[in-house]
Amino acid sequence: MNEVLSIVEYLTAYKLDYEMSQADLYGNSGQYTVYPTSEEELSEIFAFVHKYQFTVNIQGAGSKRGYGGLIDQADLLISMEKFTGIVEHQSGDMTLTVKAGTKLEDVQRYLEDFNQKLALDPFMPHVSTIGGVIASNDSGPKRLNYGSARDAVIGLRVVYPDGKVIRTGGKVVKNVAGYDMNKLFISSMGTLGVITEVTVKLRPLAKSTATCIISFQGEDRNTIYSFTRNLLNNSIEPISCELLDPIVSYKISGINKLSLLISFEDVEKSVEYQIKYIQSLIEEEMNLIVLRNSEEKQLWDRLYQLPIDKEAEHNNGEKLFAVAKIGTINLNVIDILLKVMEIRRNTNIDIYTHGGVGHGLMQLYIKGEEREMIETLTKMREVTNENGGYCIIKHLPLAQRLVFDTWGETKGAHYLLEGIKTKVDPKKILNRKRYVGGI
Amino acid sequence: MKKWKLKTKDRHIHGLSQLLNDKQAILYHKEDLISYDCDGFTIHKSLPRAVVFPHSTEEVARIVKYCHDHALPFLARGAGTGLSGGAIPLNNEVIISMVKMKRLIDIDLDNRRAVVEPGYVNLKLTNQIIERGYYYAPDPSSQYCCTIGGNVAENAGGAHCLKYGVTTNHILGLELVLPNGEIVEIGRNGVLDEPGYDLLGLITGSEGTLGIVTKIIVRILKNPEGKQTVLAYFDDIEDGSQAVSDIISAGIVPAALEMMDKTAIEGVEAAAFPVGHPKDIAAVLLIEVDGIAAGIDEQIEQILSVCRHRNVREVRAAKDEKERAAWWANRKTGFGAMGAISPDYLVQDGVIPRSKLPEVLRRINKISEEYDLRIANIFHAGDGNLHPLVLFDARVPGETEKALAAGSACLKVCADVGGTITGEHGVGIEKREEMRFVFTDEEIAAQTDIRSVFNTDNLLNAGKLFPSPSRCAEVKKEIKEKIIG
């Protein structure tokens, strides 16, 4: 008779690299953590857990542990942290295949030598793995021009919850053979399978770059609205057009004013022309600073690091730190941002935000005690609904996620999402309850 | 006035007609149905049961629900320009023609979006907004008549998708009727990253097998400030191919990078839009750069220099918009132009890694010799999307089959060098078997599993996209059923 092998017996028998792990503030962990280094290992682990219906959580390097999920610990946590490396770089074809645990920053650093880049600007690139960025479809202000993972990924290798390996897409930049299965796994929060290899298309590194900070003296809606609208309707081609509230502006540039962050990447003549153009638009009540080289890089680094708050992590949970993502119709970013400033003025809560007026995605940060935190998040969800959008929580401890739903209300087509999950993971062993509507 | 009456005993025609606000918006006589027995893929023909012309989402939903409740196969059709047979009624389907749903519902320039009905013609959108400084980027060669609904179904590309992406990169929201008749909205208000699996991305390019799109929110772009087009003639096709790689390696992202070979040039010069390409050259490259005007000259200089390095016979930039437009008309009508030098032609649509271009062109040349059929090559060289055009004469017994086999052999070459079997035309019925060149049985099953979530009874556009189950898979299924049973 077959006895159910325990996870430890299995991990030991197969000489897998594992450790016993602790539950933590953010949940989404496992009783044991295993660090596979090959697709075969991963596939065998899944064949095993699938057979005995053990539950599995999956993480890249763990930077998104506070992003969704209602379960403290699964039986096993699979960490992709050691699943790293470049698999294939076809420099002439401008395509790259890389293992999913590779940090985004490492990918970019590797590509720099070839004057190429992966056109993606997620937050925390120094700790985020490419697999995690894809599974969450994370993107930053440069989404305006770069697009997101759904625009850059051309192929994936995925281990299904039963251990089979499925390839989606391919290695060429244009492909409509069969369904666009890549899309199913991008932004699936790891609920459908484990991405092991990613093939992306690349872009040349720009020959010249610069970032303009336009700061407004006042906070008058009409001034900001008409200036922004006019800016977007001109023939310049900004890579980002991000509106920063005074707090974010101060944190990344030292300027305590409501500001617009406009960056350019092109040949030098074009960048310089566009900067001149911006200069010609500046009115009396505004100020313009142009950043280049290391100053420019440092500004952007600070912006991408905003979700990491050392202070919040070291105050023993007295004050909570939440990060939220807001999606809205492009120019509504202005109204939502002004609303956030109003909430800050009228309450004690530490809340700040920035958002892309050309793509409608915002990042929101809140520090405060539990009760005021939940109240504020509830309010923000109302505000974004009124603006035709949504507000989801990218980072919050498990205890508060159990009180305030990360994803908000489900939509009419939700049963299709459930149907997809059930087809791919019928035993519901993978990243259980991590996603929308408890998928 | 004589009262209009349906002249058929088919109770379902009566049933469907009852669901339409305009009871006459249905075709069912054989002579009327013949126009719907195929689309742009004319090799395979099959008659539909009827063709209905709804005017609204609610009508579409009623028709779909009727078909679902009565187990009638059905499919949606746009302008019928598809090149892989996606709209061919293989199973005597009720065709739901979307051509009457052709309104432009909304334009919101500030937020860069437009809302259209699926029957709205692609080029009309750009024509509507170009004066105000905007355009819709996906530009398939058939854009003057193909519908945006069809573009969504096929995830259509075009000459300019090298820089701007294909249809899927420009779709923000969809309203669709599911195969059970339910109406759902995805990407509400066109807001990015709606929480949940990316159904928008999954449905775009699903060739009308997951639902029928009834409303589309598309992204619109600002016209580039400057634009310049270069024409380059090469005596050696390998030099032309190398020039393509060199341009990309130089860090230039052209808006378009097109190539035609000798046979293709012979065709376009004999057809309606000749521009005087020399007959004795091996390849012509059409390269377009757009963006901020101040930065364009530098890129053009670089392109000219790259071409000279690769032994170009002649290279020059268009002297004005008229010349540029003439070059593009010559290129964009390239497929049809083959009619001027051959009674029939078959369009193929493989994609390869750009660097394999010289090797693949040699191998296609070999296929041409082997099958004793001329093959012209017109392609989006910048993204490695080849369009081998197999020239043949359907009147010669056996030649159609030979052409199909030669086309398939070209796709095999593309798959063998790490590419794929279709870049923008779709699988349809034409390339169902070729899906095996790129996917395993398990990978195909993973896709049909997803289909079954939406299209539970497989009444919507059945028999498309996927090969019939392989013997091996059938045997496996039988065994499984025995075990379960």
Image (cartoon, rainbow, N blue to C red):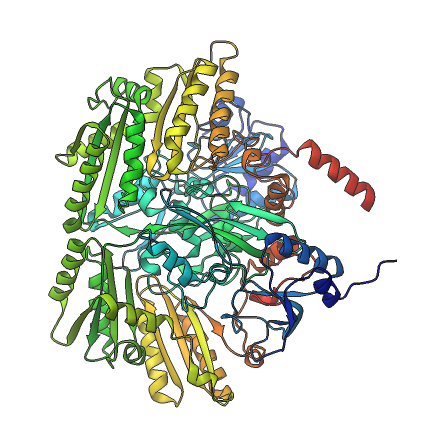
Left or right of A330, for residue A27: right
**Placement of B295 over or under A318, stated as above or below:** above
* Residue B460, image quadrant: top right
Classify the position of the N terminus of chain B by image quarter: top left
Q: Nearer the viewer, residue B471 or B298?
A: B298
Q: Nearer the viewer, residue B346 or B142?
A: B346
Question: Is residue B350 visible in this depiction of the protein?
Answer: yes
Left or right of A308, for residue B96: right
Of all residues, the one furthest to the front in this rendering is A15
**Residue A275: percent from the left, percent from the top?**
16, 62
Of all residues, the one furthest to the right in this rendering is A1
Q: Residue placed at 55% from the left, 25% from the top?
A: B46
* Residue A435, image quadrant: bottom right
Q: Residue placed at 28% from the left, 51% from the top?
A: B221
**Residue A111: percent from the left, percent from the top?**
36, 54
Classify the position of the C terminus of chain B by image quarter: top right
Q: Nearer the viewer, residue B327 or B120?
A: B327
Q: Residue placed at 61% from the left, 54% from the top?
A: A420
**Residue B66: percent from the left, percent from the top?**
60, 43
Count of number-bearing discs: 0
Question: Is residue B332 visible in this depiction of the protein?
Answer: no
